[in-house]
Amino acid sequence: MRLARLVAVLLASGFALFVAALALSSFPAYADSPYGRDDRQASGYGRPLPPFEYTDHARPASSGRTIMLYVDSDFPAGPRQAIVAAMRQWNYALNGYVQFRARVLPREATSADIARLRRDGAWIVASVDSRHPVAQRGEGLHALAVTVGNGHDGFVYVIADRIGGRDLTGVVMHEFGHVLGAGHDQAGLMAPVYNAAYARCIDRDSVALVANAQRLPLQRLNWCETPGYNQPRSAANAYR
């Protein structure tokens, strides 16, 4: 998956932000795994993960609500691309009823700037390490990422030094589910623990949690389907 070149733009809000030319409002319908048509990524259970497909329901006549994401400029290009991929999958699943859009938050943004963005309903995707206070207490003690917010705005903290070889796209997709109001589920993307199989795409039950939270018509949204595959369970590292 390719990213467009990042460009710098001045926003009318009174301070400079670098706008990522991510063109992320839509995600093309595809019938392939993000790892390619012949998915041979290890599942962690001694077998390859099968490819998945998304449903393709009709989009509404007009676009719905937009949720702004401001991505920490401390993320290197690779992790930033993973965040983009997570956002694009959710945009496809949400099918135009709700839409994420992302910009890059530069280092010179002040706490007052961030407070202003949050008042407007923005979420900050921040790169931290395990020394950060959010990783030192409660759920954050063993988490790969933590979402802290009030349903209107907040922070998605990615604990970068705990990600290791795990799929950051899947980790962030889980957290964006929380941004959209979903709680934890017994299995699937919104299970409370990281699982390489669960994290590949957005399953129907996870979409249903979001549809309920956002009061959206479930049957008009999209979700991934993998016929004949029962996802294994794991008690690995927690999301939060």
Image (cartoon, rainbow, N blue to C red):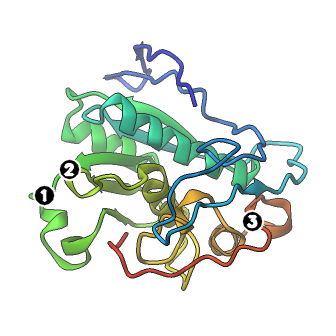
Q: Can you say whether 135 is above or below 103 in the image?
A: below
SS of the residue under disc 1: loop
Q: How far apart are marks 2 and 3 (CA)?
A: 34 Å
Q: Position of residue 221 (x, y in %)?
A: 79, 60
> 33 left or right of 44?
right
Q: What residue type is labelled 2?
A: Val
Q: What residue type is labelled 3?
A: Thr
Residue placed at 45% from the left, 61% from the top? 175
What is the spatial separation of the Cα atoms under label 1 and label 3, in whole angstroms?
38 Å
Horizontal arrangement in the rendering, residue 2 relative to residue 219 (left or right): left
Kindly identify which residue carries mark 2.
128
Q: Pointer 2 and pointer 3: residues touching (CB < 8 Å)?
A: no
**First of labels 2, 3 by sequence position:** 2
| 149 displayed left or right of 55 | left
Residue 188 placement, left or right of 157: right
Residue 36 vs residue 125, the one in the foreground: 36
Q: How far apart are marks 1 and 2 (CA)?
A: 6 Å
Task: Quickly name the residue at label 3.
Answer: 226
Quadrant where the N terminus is found in the figure = top right
Q: Is residue 170 above or below residue 2?
A: below
Residue farthest bottom in this picture: 186
Q: Which residue is drawn at 20% across and 41% down?
A: 111
